[in-house]
Image (cartoon, rainbow, N blue to C red):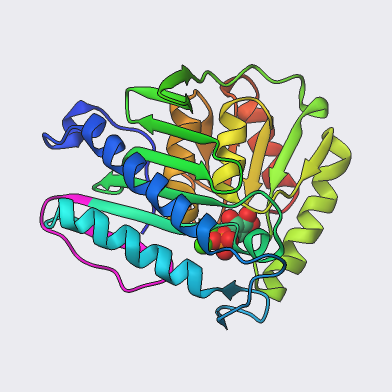
């Protein structure tokens, strides 16, 4: 499944993204409280490993995804559901929920305060409503396709407009690494090639939070290989609705490559990223 971050009102097939984002927010906040209440002091036990010995899942990731799926499909039983940890549920309504119950599981395990619940509704592969909440800090972001992106401040919203970054050599770049050793080796070489051309690189550990940071100018650019739809859907919508251009190797972002930057530098930055071998 690859995602599109463009399109018009005709692609919404009569669904109202404003209602979907309210549902995403209510469920996202409940899920964040659920996770926060279940985090023990110290290091969280790992339940299993997935694509590699460092790709971990905890019982809290699994229980959180079950809670989110139950809450969403109870309200909207005809929708589809794609989550990181469980089986996909096909739907008939045309709306699919794309969910990462904890984006930043390694941070959750270690107690580093950058892990998030990420919930997006998508229609025909286009995210149309998204909500991201940092479980540790309570910071929240939302977006609807064609309706902008914002940061929640209690009951109010601050509309986000990604600021114009400084020149390429002054850009602060967010990135991340695959759990698979052979891919990491490749990514490490590409990041080493990128580093001399930019201000610096940050590896925060949650792609959803990276994309929200990009939307509000706490990062100037982003690059990562191996992002799945649940890593990208909600944060990518927040970024694109804030005016960030998203791209991939050829066209839109996908598993192979996700890049993001303000349109004034995106062409130059995307060319640089490709030149570095990502
Ligand atoms: C990971 C985080 C990380 C990114 C990885 C993702 P997870 O998600 O978003 O920042 O670099 O590619 O897999 O495993 O913590 O849900
Ligand atoms: Ca993730
Ligand atoms: Ca996850």
In magenta, the rendered stretch is 80-95
> With 220 as the anchor, is 201 left or right in this view?
right
Q: Is residue 226 visible?
A: no
> Viewer-proximal residue, 169 or 128?
128
The residue that appears at 44% across and 20% down in the rendered structure is 157
**Position of 9 relative to 270 (above/below):** above
> With 111 as the anchor, is 11 left or right in this view?
left
Tell me where residue 262 sits by quadrant.
top right
For the stretch drawn in magenta, the main secondary structure is: loop
* Number of residue marks: 0
> With 184 as the anchor, is 6 left or right in this view?
left
The residue that appears at 70% across and 20% down in the rendered structure is 165
Q: Position of residue 272 (x, y in %)?
A: 72, 39
Q: Position of residue 173 (x, y in %)?
A: 73, 38
Q: Is residue 161 visible?
A: yes
The residue that appears at 82% across and 34% down in the rendered structure is 198
- Ligand 1 located in image quadrant: bottom right
Quarter of the N terminus within the rendering:
bottom left
Q: Position of residue 100 (x, y in %)?
A: 45, 57
Residue furthest to the right in view is 196
Residue 169 is a magenta residue: no
The residue that appears at 30% across and 36% down in the rendered structure is 21
> Viewer-proximal residue, 168 or 249?
168
**Position of 51 relative to 31 (above/below):** below
Q: Position of residue 217 (x, y in %)?
A: 65, 25
Tell me where residue 62 sits by quadrant.
bottom left
């Amino acid at each position: 499944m690859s995602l599109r971050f463009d399109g018009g009102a005709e692609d919404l097939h009569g669904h109202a993204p404003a209602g979907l984002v309210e549902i995403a927010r209510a469920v996202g906040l409940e899920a964040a409280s659920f996770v926060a209440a279940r985090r023990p002091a110290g290091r969280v036990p790992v339940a299993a490993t997935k694509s590699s010995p460092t790709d971990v899942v905890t019982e809290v990731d699994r229980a959180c995804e079950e809670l989110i799926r139950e809450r969403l499909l109870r309200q909207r039983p005809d929708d589809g559901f794609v989550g990181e940890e469980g089986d996909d549920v096909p739907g008939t309504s045309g709306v699919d929920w794309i969910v990462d119950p904890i984006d930043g599981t390694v941070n959750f395990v270690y107690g580093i305060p950058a892990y998030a619940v990420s919930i997006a509704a998508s229609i025909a592969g286009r995210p149309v409503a998204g909500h991201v909440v940092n479980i540790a800090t309570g910071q929240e972001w939302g977006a609807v396709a064609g309706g902008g992106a914002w940061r929640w401040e209690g009951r109010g919203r601050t509309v986000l407009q990604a600021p114009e970054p400084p020149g390429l050599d002054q850009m602060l770049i967010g990135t991340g690494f695959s759990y698979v050793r052979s891919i990491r080796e490749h990514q490490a070489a590409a990041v080493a090639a990128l580093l001399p051309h930019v201000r610096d690189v940050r590896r925060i550990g949650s792609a959803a939070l990276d994309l929200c940071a990009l939307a509000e100018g706490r990062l100037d650019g982003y690059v990562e290989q191996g992002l799945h739809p649940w890593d990208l859907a909600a944060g990518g919508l927040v970024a694109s609705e804030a005016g960030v251009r998203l791209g991939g190797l050829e066209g839109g972002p996908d598993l192979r490559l996700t890049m993001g930057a303000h349109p004034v530098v995106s062409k130059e930055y995307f060319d640089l990223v490709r030149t570095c071998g990502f």
